[in-house]
Image (cartoon, coloured by chain):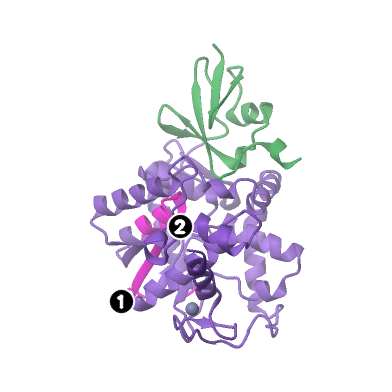
Amino acid sequence: MKCKKCGAKASINMRQHKLALCKEHYLAWAPEQTERFIKKYRMFQRDERILVAVSGGKDSLSLWDILYCLGYQADGLYIGLGIDEGIGYSAESQRLCQKFAEARGLHLHIVDVAQEYGQPIPALAQISHRGRGRPCAVCGLTKRHIMNRVARDLGYDVLATGHNLDDEVAVLFGNTLHWATSYLVRQGPVLHEGPGFVRKVKPLCRFYEREMAAYAILRGIEYIYDECPFAEGATSIYYKELLNKLENDKPGAKLTFYLRFLDAREAGFFAPTADSMPELHPCPNCGQPTSNEGLCSFCRLIEKAQLHA
Amino acid sequence: MAVKLILRNKEYEVPAGITLRAALEKVGILPESVLAIRQGEMILEDEILKEGDVIKLVAVISGGSGRISALF
Ligand SMILES: [Zn+2]
Ligand SMILES: [Zn+2]
């Protein structure tokens, strides 16, 4: 197969776009497309300061690289979760983020959960009893809290995450299976800022996961190949594999599912319900908005952990 | 000799002279869920595999197996 732009041997074929590109043209195309989506979904402007949440994985590091190549003011945020599981998962992912930032002279903020809150994620999860042995719920809650806190404290205009189309479609598929309309109405490339909430954007939301892996490899970005050890057997991974089976037989199925959903949402097919727009007030401890009476879920978690310490 | 496919710590052998797509299907790997690298270069599904080729497969889903059988 040949590159559509120059006729050289292609390195990637994107069947959903009927587009094959060589390495050079792919590495130019991916940032151009990202720029197009940033503008189309009005994610941020050139004069805004962006905080990119990086995990050491291919998506977040590729996103940071692309924003850097496009000339945006983007700093990184790495959250040390303290997950070891015998493979040094967090230590290795932090090392890769630091190496990436140093090589490009970029600024990386590091927040270590254990240092700041007394316990690493696996211990917090055990104490909380949330999620039956899997710390993913506690981990998600903690990351959301810290990302919002750091972005606000340090005056960033927007928080960018590396979610790709496969991530978005897996969530969409799960929420559709359960007709979780209160989640459906909120899913999209941009989550607007509100009182106490920083704007959140997903500039890679229209790239297939495969394309981001290809970008990282072709660009020579060293990323952590192993998924978090706790994600093994997760439903989201099962959905992704299922959707890739569909994509394999019907090229473009994932992209169409996502884009038609965004159209439907835009057209008002999913009306906000009471539980999708809960009344929020600032947590008396940390000041972040919460629908709880009293402390927010994160502060409750930390309070519980301190009682156990 | 034939052709060797390596995915994570598993190795598969396929005959030379078939396309990458046919080779992946033969061993039950979904072409959509992997990238294939031969001698440091990414190759596409229509590439004909040659005697002695060693193809490194990269699972594109973080944490995914790349195997069709994982679904059933
Ligand atoms: Zn080209
Ligand atoms: Zn709080």
Q: Which residue is mark 1?
A: A47
* Left or right of A302 in this view: A106: left
Any idea which chain is the green one in this picture? B
Which label sits on residue A219?
none
Q: Residues within 10 Å of mark 1 (few under 14, many from 20)?
A: few
The range drawn in magenta is: A41-66
Tell me the residue at 68%/73% (across/down).
A264
Depicted A153 relative to depicted A84: above or below: below
The colour assigned to chain A within the rendered structure: purple
Res A25 seen here: no
Q: Position of residue A297 (x, y in %)?
A: 56, 74
Calculate the distance from the C-alpha at mark 2 to the C-alpha at mark 1.
36 Å
SS assignment at label 2: loop
Beta carbon of the mark 2 residue lies under 8 A of ligand 2: no
Q: Earlier in the sequence, mark 2 or mark 1?
A: 1
Q: Are marks 2 and 1 on the same chain?
A: yes
- Circle 1 marks a residue in which chain? A
Label 1 SS: loop
Q: Is residue A82 above or below residue A276?
A: above
The chain to which mark 2 is attached is A
Asked whether, in this view, residue B32 is left or right of residue A4, the answer is right
Q: Which mark is residue A120?
A: 2
Which residue is painted at 61% across and 75% down in the image?
A: A186
Q: Is mark 1 within 8 Å of ligand 2?
A: no
Residue A119 point in image, percent of width and height: 45, 60
In the rendered image, the residue lying farthest to the left is A105
Q: Residue A155: say if magenta.
A: no
In the foreground, A145 or A285: A285
Residue flagged by tag 1: what amino acid is it? Answer: Asp
**Residue type, label 2:** Pro
Return the residue nearer the eye: A42 or B17. Answer: A42
